[in-house]
Image (tube, rainbow, N blue to C red):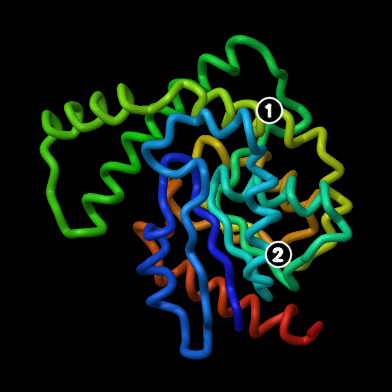
Amino acid sequence: MKALFIHGIEDQGASWRETCDALAEGFEYETPDFPWQRGTDFTWLGRQAPHDAVTAELARVRPEICVAHSFGALALIEALLRDPAGYRPRAIVLIAPFYLNTAERLDWRLLDRTRVEFSNLMRDSIVSRAKRVGRAVSEETLEMMVSKLMSGINPLAFTELFGHFALMQHQPLEKLAIPGRLIGSEDDPGFAGDRAQELSSRLGLELTLLPGRDHFLHYTAPQAVAESIQSLLQGSYASAS
């Protein structure tokens, strides 16, 4: 079973290590770094769209299943919708994709609120990475790390994420037609409540919501993510293949 893993914005392919380690034997996987990886200046946006990068990796790897987190999940959805004649995996798993549902209004208050949520998620990413290596971080140290992280992030990281988040509702999501699963946390601000339910319904994907407020489940709950992938393959996908 060949799998392709797509990381989120300001992250990297190595973030999937624990999830991949938790998968059963028989999985062959690739975890490449995408252009929106940690530390990029985002000037690549002038040469390549995110969905083009995903399309290229799908054609190269030709995975049976594709697992994508956050911004990476949005890029995967767009790649599959834009190129229906291109390579298509037999199943997908989307973890905590940002989605603005059709009942929400796009205005400046939403942009401001999302900007704050983006900063909070970057803060959460530091905490999640610290927990991943069993390291305790004091509140003072955490604030210093967050300040340093945010000062090093190109503003285009947020504007690109916000654009995909705000416009995804206008995509013909019902045409995706690939079986799979949506995984997220009940209180994740970008993927909570009606947002998760609507996206699941429009994509035709099973929905799994774990308790808590965690956007980085592949860091903090890799075993649960791996089990969800495997149960999907052993369930409806297996019977359909």
Tell me what residue is drawn at x 52 percent, y 14 percent. 112
Q: What residue did someone put label 2 on?
A: 59
Q: Is residue 186 visible?
A: no
Does 22 sit above or below residue 33? below
Label at residue 232: none
Q: Is residue 142 left or right of residue 204?
A: left
In front of the other: 78 or 191:
78
- Circle 2 packing at 10 Å, graded few (<14), some (14-19), many (20+), is few
Q: Residue 193's spot in the image, x, y percent?
A: 61, 41
To which quarter of the image does residue 142 belong?
A: top left
Does residue 112 lie above or below 26 as drawn? above
- In-image side of 149 versus 109 (left or right): left
Residue pushed farthest top? 108
Taking the view exactly as shown, the residue that stands out farthest to the bottom is 25
| Residue pictured at 17% horizontal, 59% vertical | 134
Q: Where does the N terminus fall, quadrant-wise?
A: bottom right
Find residue 166 and name its label: 1
Residue 128's spot in the image, x, y percent? 30, 49
Query: What is the three-letter code of the residue carrying label 1?
Result: Ala
Among numbered discs 2 and 1, the one appearing first in the sequence: 2
* 90 to 113, vertically: above or below: below
Question: Which amino acid lies under the numbered mark 2 shown in the image of this protein?
Answer: Ala
Of 68 and 153, which appears nearest the observer? 153
Residue in the image at 53% along x and 52% along y = 69
Label 2 – label 1 distance at C-alpha: 28 Å
Specify whether 140 is left or right of 173.
Answer: left
Q: Secondary structure at mark 2?
A: helix
Q: Position of residue 76 (x, y in %)?
A: 67, 52
Q: Quadrant of residue 219?
A: bottom left
Residue 65: give x, y in percent of width and height.
65, 71
Q: Is residue 146 left or right of residue 153?
A: left
